[in-house]
Image (cartoon, helix red, strand yellow):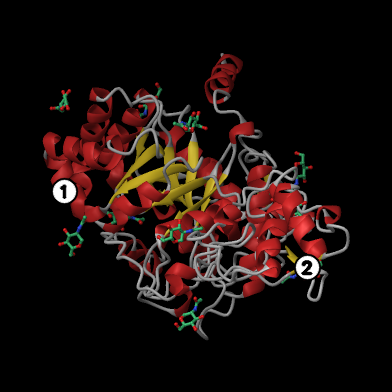
């Protein structure tokens, strides 16, 4: 009987295989100089980021993401939740304007209905499941319910007794919401969206949780956390939290709902009371997280099951209220320059190429103009470079000289050829450089979206209805989780002794 159950479970869960595991990135927009959507998309493309989550359904952003090959989660902001949860037609309108109008050019794959509603906006909890159902029925009406999933991100703090993971359960006072929510997710083939912040778990544990355990760093075997019920070893907080969420769902008899982590990350800077918000720790956490997710290891209790994860977050958000760390979760600054260079060699394409070491191919200073002209003619002809931006009236026409024009053609060819060093030679008149030759609206291949046109112009307003600021205030003051975790950890240590 027991084997039967396990087999069924394996069959059910194996629908989501680990080769689908991906890394995405959250895009918060609380920046004083928020880049224009076209610049955001240029950065995403340059960094090979193919999955993003928006905290709203900003029209300009959705337009910029059209035909980009990037898969997009849009969100119903918490402020709009009450209206949508109380009116089928409001929900249908929302779906029409923010989803149907953009699909399929913009590849919307899911809708987050609110953000950490139970903890951030508890008085909207009673309409949450209705809101999901209304949004879903609007998708059904447009025949998009198979392509676009509906769910709602929850904070991991509603999982109690998360250590050991096998004994974890959801805060029971939320069962009246969670049971219909899980039932909805199961019947619509959707997934649980979970936000996991080992940084806060570590910070609030008063030293009980080792920093290395939060950062996915190797632990000596005697320091690894062991689940006393299952004897499963945990080497990081992230896996323990995901398995705790599986257990909490199983406790309510839901055993086949996959999990996607909609937020996780580490701040790179903090105030004096946040000494572990450092560049090194942020780099370690995010680099290790990315490798861990893409390595398809799954979690100890569900090995090989994909736990795709969206990193929090793309940009540092300088307008966020709260401590210094709140403004420093980003991978990039507003110019698209990386805050730190992730250690990701050998882990695939996403975020693997840093922006500071970007290389370009330019015409050598003082090269013979006749040889440059011959090389330019070759590049724009047999070399198959699209030289139309060099024509009069086009962005790269000025300055109209042979050095500038051949530099554009050489650099384009070099990037077309995958930046192999022998593709930047042109009979010795070309050379590789790290200085971006882009100027004005002439953006060179390899340039990371520092759109000169916008640098000097006030970018059009994103006009976004920002919603993600509420999520954090609560998490910061919520120490319940950490106490429970701390006790759990102590118990484990006791078991180990
Ligand atoms: C730069 O900005 C211009 C002006 O809107 C836009 O048309 C162009 O596509 C942008 N280029 C890039 C690479 O973002
Ligand atoms: C959207 O992404 C999914 C998943 O990769 C893919 O199967 C689908 O073809 C994409 N749709 C469009 C319109 O590009
Ligand atoms: C909501 O509206 C859709 C049509 O958009 C309809 O199919 C569905 O039955 C309605 N649901 C409820 C609960 O009224
Ligand atoms: C469970 O949730 C309720 C309602 O939000 C809250 O009052 C209570 O403190 C939570 N219990 C624990 C142990 O966190
Ligand atoms: C889960 O299933 C068991 C066995 O069928 C049952 O005893 C229990 O009440 C169920 N729990 C919930 C929360 O439905
Ligand atoms: C990747 O997976 C292999 C086998 O599952 C494991 O041995 C290795 O430690 C993992 N590497 C990382 C970085 O998680
Ligand atoms: C990253 O850069 C290296 C060296 O320039 C190149 O070989 C590799 O293909 C690049 N990876 C991606 C995903 O662009
Ligand atoms: C650029 O690449 C070199 C050589 O691979 C490396 O030593 C250097 O640290 C890189 N620069 C940055 C900013 O990472
Ligand atoms: C901005 O404008 C100033 C003055 O017009 C010019 O000198 C500067 O090069 C421009 N910067 C960019 C990035 O285009
Ligand atoms: C943009 O914001 C302004 C002021 O907040 C508002 O009046 C306007 O309706 C918004 N436009 C769109 C397209 O959302």
Q: Residue at x 31, y 56 (%)?
A: 119
Residue 497 showing in the rendered view: no
Q: Quadrant of the N terminus?
A: top right
C-alpha distance separating marks 2 and 1:
68 Å
Rendering quarter of residue 342: bottom right
Percent from the top left, x then y, of residue 40? 47, 58
For image coordinates 51% across by 66% down, the residue present is: 330
Check disc 1 and report the residue beneath it. Answer: 82
> Mark 1: which secondary structure?
helix
Lateral position of residue 373 relative to residue 111, left or right: right
Q: Which residue is mark 2?
A: 369
In this rendering, the answer to whether 374 lies above or below 72 is below
Residue 447 spot, x, y in % from top left? 61, 62
Q: Looking at the rendering, which quadrant does residue 212 occupy?
A: bottom right
Image quarter where ligand 10 lies: bottom left
Q: Residue 339: percent from the left, percent from the top?
A: 59, 71
Q: Residues within 10 Å of mark 1 (few under 14, many from 20)?
A: some
Specify whether residue 21 is in view.
yes
**Local secondary structure at mark 2:** helix
370 or 236: which is nearer to us? 370
């Amino acid at each position: 009987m027991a084997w039967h159950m396990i087999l069924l479970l394996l069959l059910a869960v194996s629908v989501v295989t680990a080769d689908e595991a991906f890394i995405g990135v959250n895009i918060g927009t609380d920046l004083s100089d928020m880049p224009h959507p076209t610049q955001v998309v240029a950065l995403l493309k340059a960094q090979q980021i193919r999955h993003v989550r928006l905290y709203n359904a900003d029209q300009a952003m959705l337009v910029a993401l059209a035909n980009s090959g990037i898969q997009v989660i849009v969100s119903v902001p918490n402020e709009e939740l009450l209206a949508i949860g109380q009116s089928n037609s409001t929900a249908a309108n929302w779906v029409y304007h923010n989803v149907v109008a953009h699909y399929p050019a913009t590849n919307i794959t899911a809708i987050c209905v609110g953000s950490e509603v139970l903890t951030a906006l508890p008085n909207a909890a009673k309409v949450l499941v209705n809101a999901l159902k209304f949004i879903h029925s609007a998708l059904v009406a447009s025949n998009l319910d198979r392509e676009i999933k509906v769910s709602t991100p929850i904070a991991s703090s509603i999982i109690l007794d998360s250590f050991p993971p096998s004994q974890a359960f959801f805060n029971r006072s939320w069962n009246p919401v969670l049971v219909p929510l899980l039932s909805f997710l199961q019947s619509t083939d959707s997934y649980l969206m979970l936000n996991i912040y080992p940084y806060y778990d570590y910070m609030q544990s008063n030293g009980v949780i080792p920093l290395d355990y939060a950062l996915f760093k190797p632990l000596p075997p005697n320091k690894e956390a062991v689940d006393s019920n299952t004897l499963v070893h945990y080497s990081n907080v992230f896996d323990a939290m995901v398995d705790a969420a599986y257990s909490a769902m199983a406790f309510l008899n839901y055993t086949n709902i996959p999990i996607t982590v909609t937020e996780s990350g580490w701040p790179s800077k903090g105030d004096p009371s946040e000494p572990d918000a450092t560049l090194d720790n942020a780099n370690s956490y995010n680099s290790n997280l990315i490798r861990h997710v893409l390595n398809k290891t799954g979690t100890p209790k569900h090995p090989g099951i994909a736990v795709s994860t969206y990193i929090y977050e793309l940009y540092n958000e300088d307008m966020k209220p709260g401590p210094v760390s709140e403004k420093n979760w980003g991978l990039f600054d507003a110019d698209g320059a990386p805050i730190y260079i992730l250690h990701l060699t050998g882990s695939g394409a996403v975020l693997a190429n840093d922006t500071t070491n970007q290389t370009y191919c330019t015409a050598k200073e003082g090269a013979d103009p006749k040889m440059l002209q011959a090389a330019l003619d070759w590049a724009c002809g047999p070399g198959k470079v699209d030289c139309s931006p060099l024509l009069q009236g086009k962005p790269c026409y000025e300055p109209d000289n042979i050095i500038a024009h051949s530099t554009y053609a050489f650099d384009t060819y070099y990037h077309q050829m995958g930046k192999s060093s022998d593709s930047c030679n042109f009979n010795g008149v070309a050379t590789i450089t790290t200085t971006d030759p882009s100027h004005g609206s002439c953006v060179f291949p390899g340039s990371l979206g520092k759109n000169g046109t916008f640098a000097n112009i006030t970018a059009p307003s994103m006009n976004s209805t920002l919603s993600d600021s509420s999520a954090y205030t609560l998490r910061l003051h919520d120490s319940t989780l950490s106490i429970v975790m701390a006790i759990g950890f102590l118990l484990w240590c006791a078991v180990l002794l």
